[in-house]
Amino acid sequence: MFLVTAGQMQEMDKQAIESFGISGLVLMENAARGAVDILINRYKDLKTKRIAILAGRGNNGGDGFVIARYLMEKGILVNTFLLSKKKKVQGDAKINMDLAQKLCDGNNAGEIIEIPDAKTFQNNRAAICRHDLIIDAILGTGLNSDVKGFFKDAIELLNRSKSPIFAIDIPSGLHSDTGQPLGIAVKADATATFAFAKAGHILYPGNKYTGKLDVVDIGITNYIAREKSISLSVLTKKQIAPLFPSRSFDSHKGSYGHLAIIAGSPGKTGAAALCANAAARSGTGLITLGIPESLNERLEPQVTEPMTRPLKEDGNGLLTETCMDQINTMLDGKQALALGPGIGTHDRTKKLVHALIEKSQIPLIIDADGLNCLADNSKVLKKKKAPAILTPHPGEMARLCRTSTAKVQADRIGTAISFAKNHDVILVLKGAQTIIALPDGTCSICPTGNPGMASGGMGDVLTGMIAGFCAQGFSPKDAARAGVYIHGLCADRLAKKLSKKMGAFGYLATDVMNDIPFAIHQDLL
């Protein structure tokens, strides 16, 4: 499912009008008609309900006027509250306002009430609240500054209302590209958007404001969309399932790759074990886990199927550049290398991490302490000889970019794409709606996952999954997408078992790991 920015949507609207002769009025008509169909399917017995439409003076308000007309023609009572003077409404929005006004005058199906200022709004607050359903057509996708004045008051009123709210195109006040509220935004129960979903509908917290999302086909041809080379999309089951063909009857463990993992330090053997065991659960044929030699005895019982390779250490249980020759031997015949879970950030460990990045001939999956070892020198990534997948959480991303976590979270897509392009890596920015950014500037958002994943070890499991898929022969891009999607899918399955709400908690990273094969075979294939 493609996602577009506000700018891309405006360009496609313009091209549809100028190059294909589809008038703005037709686009507005198609949008509103589709929104009405969704309304009727979603809210039953509309003829028994009083409906309020809050409309701005722009095209979003114009959509609202067309919706009002369609509903009134069906005998439904609709009152449209225009947050402007009628004389300020122009273009296609004015044409549709005038058409709606004729219906109001002709059959008493409702009225259009002018609300040009804060005082008039205060006088109409009670009238707005007396409606059973409220349609938000105040502000559209072009908004890029904080909501102010009585528009802010109107949104606050809607958010306090007990009536369901149906948003047109995007909840008013929500930034179309980032999903961040611009000061304040409408919290809709459902949203009908037009032509394509917008990034702000999917990204947290925008998804919480959007509610249930439906996309309306308004007649913009696929040719226009393809010409724009849309770079942002949502991962879907249809994309991931074909990556898992049926296995040949004569398969053996050598058929599905050999993964190398360098991980672990005192107090962090669990990270190494989770990574290795998750790779095994993901279908990897063979796994060799390189760990500090003093930790081998305690770690071996945690990894029954993966093999361990004790490595030279500094005497304190930390791996350093002195074990490079051992690791080079260990990497012979391997298809991928996972680097970092629980490895520590000692200066000599950093030297090892940097050396492995520069010398590895097989795809690298770098996580946790491996990322922290790059915080002071991410330029070493440009010296790599093989593809690299980085899997930071927002704090680690902030350290890599030498910025704050808040700034990373304020523009997750922009941050991920910029880093991926500048360092020629695949960047998996974990969090609500994990983002997978590729070096070519394309980016995917993962729809799976839930708050119950806020538990230690989840990232180690993800690293093992992605690395395991790489070892099995997936391209780095496909491995990252499959790992992220299935990781979240496992968590969603577990949360569903615990509660009807996806915010259920109490399951562990180990539980997610153990569910991997079941999620793949039962929910994906």
Image (cartoon, helix red, strand yellow):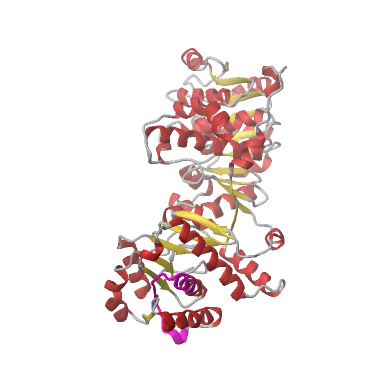
Please name the residue shown 57% across and 31% down the image. 520
Q: Position of residue 353 (x, y in %)?
A: 59, 32
Left/right placement of residue 69 relative to residue 159 reads right
Q: Residue 488: give x, y in percent of width and height.
A: 50, 38
Q: Camera-side residue: 112 or 119? A: 112
User: Closer to the camera, 161 or 326?
Assistant: 161
Residue at screen point 51% across, 52% down: 412
Question: Which quarter of the figure is the C terminus placed in?
Answer: top right
Quadrant of the rendered image containing residue 29: bottom right
The residue at 61%/50% (across/down) is 443
In the image, residue 84 lies at what x, y percent? 41, 81
Q: How many marks?
A: 0
Compared with residue 7, is residue 311 higher up or lower down, i.e. above or below? above
Q: Is residue 334 above or below residue 379?
A: above
Location of residue 434 with respect to 505 vertically, above or below: below
Q: Is residue 315 left or right of residue 151?
A: right
Q: Is residue 74 magenta?
A: yes
Residue 225 in which image quadrant: bottom right
Determine which quarter of the picture holds residue 426.
Answer: top right
Q: Is residue 330 on the magenta stretch?
A: no
Residue farthest bottom in this picture: 87
Q: Is residue 368 left or right of residue 224?
A: left
Residue 402 at x, y percent in the picture: 50, 49
The answer to whether residue 382 shows anywhere in this view is yes
Instruction: Say whether residue 309 is visible.
Output: no
Query: What range of the chain is rendered magenta?
Result: 68-88
Between 129 and 265, the one lying in front of the other is 129
